C-alpha cells in the first residue's frame, strides 16, 4: 500500500509538466536523481535498506516549487495534496534536514545530499558547493554563519553515509 504514495517516472514527468517546471530545473532534478539513486544503491549493496523508488521520485520532484518562498516546504505540501505524502515529506526537508538531532529518514538524507553534489547539472564536491554559496551570498556575518552551519550539516550527513557505505562519496559520485 505504501508504494501508492510513490509516483512512477511517468507520473513524475506529468507532475513536472503540470507545474511548468523550467527546463534547467528539470535537468537539475534528473541529475540529482542520478546521484541519489547511485548513493541509494551503494547503501543497499552494503546491506542497508534504502528505498530506491522513493529516492528517485523525490529527487526528480524535489524542486517542483523552485522560485516560491520556502520552496522545499511548498513542494512537500503540493505533493502531499496529490496523495504522495511519503515523497512530500522527503521533498519538504531537502534544503535543510532540520536540527542534527531531528529524526530524518535515510531517503531524506540521500536526496538532501545528492542535491548538494549537483550545481545546475554539474557534479561538484561539497567544498566547491559551499564556496560558491559563500561567494554569492556572504554579504553579512549572519549569512556567512548560516552558510557555515549548512555546510557543517551537509558534511555530517556525508560522513554518516560514507560510514554506512564504507567508501568516499566523492569516489562514488565524481568518478
Image: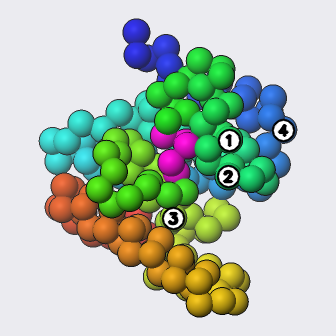
Of badges 1 and 3, the one in the foreground is 1
On the picture, is 94 further left or further right than 162?
right
- Which label number is shown at residue 116? 3
* SS assignment at label 1: helix
* SS assignment at label 3: helix
Give the residue pinned by disc 2: 70
**Quadrant assignment for the N terminus:** top left
Give the residue pinned by disc 1: 74
Magenta segment range? 90-94
Name the N-terminal-most of marks 2 and 4.
Answer: 4
Residue 22, given in percent of the width and then of the height, sits at 82, 48
Distance from Cα at disc 1 to Cα at disc 4: 15 Å
Q: Marks 2 and 3: in contact by CB < 8 Å? A: no
Outermost residue, top side: 1
Of badges 3 and 2, the one in the foreground is 2
Which residue: 60% across, 37% down? 76
The mark total stands at 4
Residue 163, given in percent of the width and then of the height, sits at 18, 62
Amino acid at each position: 500500500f505504501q508504494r501508492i504514495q510513490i509516483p512512477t517516472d511517468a507520473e513524475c514527468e506529468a507532475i513536472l509538466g503540470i507545474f511548468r517546471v523550467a527546463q534547467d530545473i528539470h535537468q537539475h532534478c534528473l541529475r540529482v536523481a542520478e546521484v541519489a539513486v547511485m548513493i541509494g544503491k551503494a547503501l543497499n549493496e552494503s546491506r542497508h535498506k534504502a528505498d530506491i523508488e522513493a529516492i528517485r521520485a523525490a529527487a526528480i520532484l524535489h524542486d517542483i516549487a523552485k522560485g516560491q518562498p520556502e520552496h522545499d516546504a511548498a513542494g512537500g505540501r503540493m505533493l502531499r495534496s496529490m496523495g504522495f505524502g511519503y515523497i512530500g515529506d522527503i521533498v519538504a526537508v531537502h534544503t535543510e534536514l532540520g536540527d542534527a538531532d531531528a529524526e530524518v529518514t535515510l531517503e531524506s538524507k540521500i536526496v538532501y545530499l545528492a542535491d548538494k553534489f549537483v550545481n545546475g547539472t554539474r557534479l561538484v564536491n561539497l567544498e566547491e558547493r559551499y564556496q560558491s554559496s559563500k561567494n554569492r551570498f556572504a554579504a553579512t556575518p549572519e549569512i556567512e554563519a548560516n552558510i557555515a552551519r549548512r555546510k557543517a550539516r551537509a558534511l555530517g550527513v556525508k560522513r554518516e553515509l560514507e560510514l554506512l557505505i564504507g567508501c568516499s562519496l566523492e569516489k562514488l559520485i565524481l568518478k
